Every structure is written in structure tokens, then in C-alpha cells.
Amino acid sequence: MVHRRLTAMEAVALAVRSEIESTHLYGRLAERVKNTAVRDVLLELQADEEKHQEHLMALYRKMLGGQEPSIPAGDGREKDVKLDPEASYVEVITAARDKERSSEEFYKRAAETVLDYKTRMFFLDVAEQERHHASALQSLLDQLQEDPLCFDREDMDPFKGLHVGP
């Protein structure tokens, strides 16, 4: 949790760590699901988080005058998601949704603590993207509530018409 006013550089460093963790989370979750449509969405989310990480790293390097940045070991949040290898779709999608909600709040708080206007606006933009991810994942949970087996049917594409990226 971000509790103090951060410099732009500190906030970017923590954000990079957050995106690294998000990228790993979606990779792990994608490995666990059987439905290819669910896996594809998780991989799309992973790719979005990788893009965020790349943009943040470029910003961080620019702030450091081209030097290689030092990334903190953690981002200050408690969010290590550990799922049972036999986790249900509901558990997987719920973990992903909760991660996105946590990320949205992290970026909003970080934006409040940063004095640099461009960095603040960037954080708010990423927070909005994370909100869209959480909303898309919530829609999937809603579908699972209506039809708990929808992800197990090969002829069913639970993501048809649903866009999760920015």
C-alpha cells in the first residue's frame, strides 16, 4: 500500500514491480485453465501488463538518464495469489479480477502521491485500463453464475464480443 508522498521515480519503480508481478500472475493462471478461450483472455491480459511494464521501464530509464533502473523486490501490496493447481474457473477469474481491482487502486493512490504531472496522468490512464480489465473479468464471473459449465463446452465462446485490452 502506498502511504506517503512518493517521488515520481519511486512511484514508477513500484509500478514496474507491480506490472512484473501481474505478468507472472496471468502466465501462471493461463497455464492452469483448460478452456482455450479463457486462456487466450488471460494471455491477452498478460500481454497488456507487459506493455505497461515496457512503458514504465522506458519512463524509468528516461528519469535515470539512460541508466538501468533498480526494481524493488515488492510493490508494497499484499497480493501474492496462490491458487490450488485444481482451481475452478471461478477461483481463477476471481483472483484475476481482484488483482486488477488492486492494481487500479494502487495506480490511483500512486497518482495522488506523485508531484510530476505527466507521471500522474500516466498512472491514471493505467488505472483506467486496469478498471476495464476488472470489469471484463467480472462479466465472465457473471456468466459463470448463470451457467457454471459454460467454460467447459467446446462450442461455447464465453468471450465472444468481449474486449479486455486497453
Image (tube, helix red, strand yellow):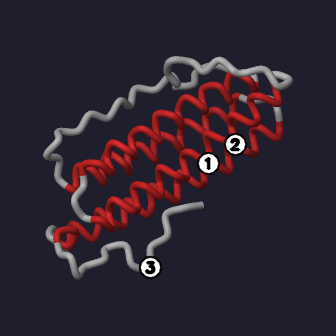
As shown in the figure, which amino acid type bears the numbered disc 1? Answer: Lys
Q: Which of 119 and 58 is in front in this view?
A: 58
Q: Which of marks 2 and 3 is in front?
A: 2
Q: Are marks 1 and 2 in contact (CB under 8 Å)?
A: yes
Quick one: SS at disc 2?
helix
Quick one: SS at disc 1?
helix
Instruction: Decide: is 47 above or below 11.
Output: below
* Residue 55 numbered mark, or none: 2
Disc on the earlier residue, 2 or 3: 2
Q: Which of 86 and 68 is in front in this view?
A: 68
CA separation, marks 3 and 1? Answer: 23 Å
Q: Nearer the viewer, residue 125 or 108?
A: 125
* Residue 19 numbered mark, or none: none
Is 138 placed left or right of 47 in the picture?
A: left
Report the residue at 22% width, 68% height from top.
151
Horizontal and vertical percent for residue 146? 20, 73
Quick one: SS at disc 3?
loop
CA separation, marks 1 and 2? Answer: 6 Å
CA separation, marks 2 and 3? Answer: 28 Å
Q: Name the residue under label 3.
A: 161
Report the residue at 67% width, 46% height from top.
124
Disc on the earlier residue, 3 or 1: 1
Residue 72, quarter of picture: top right
Instruction: Decide: is 80 above or below 137.
Output: above
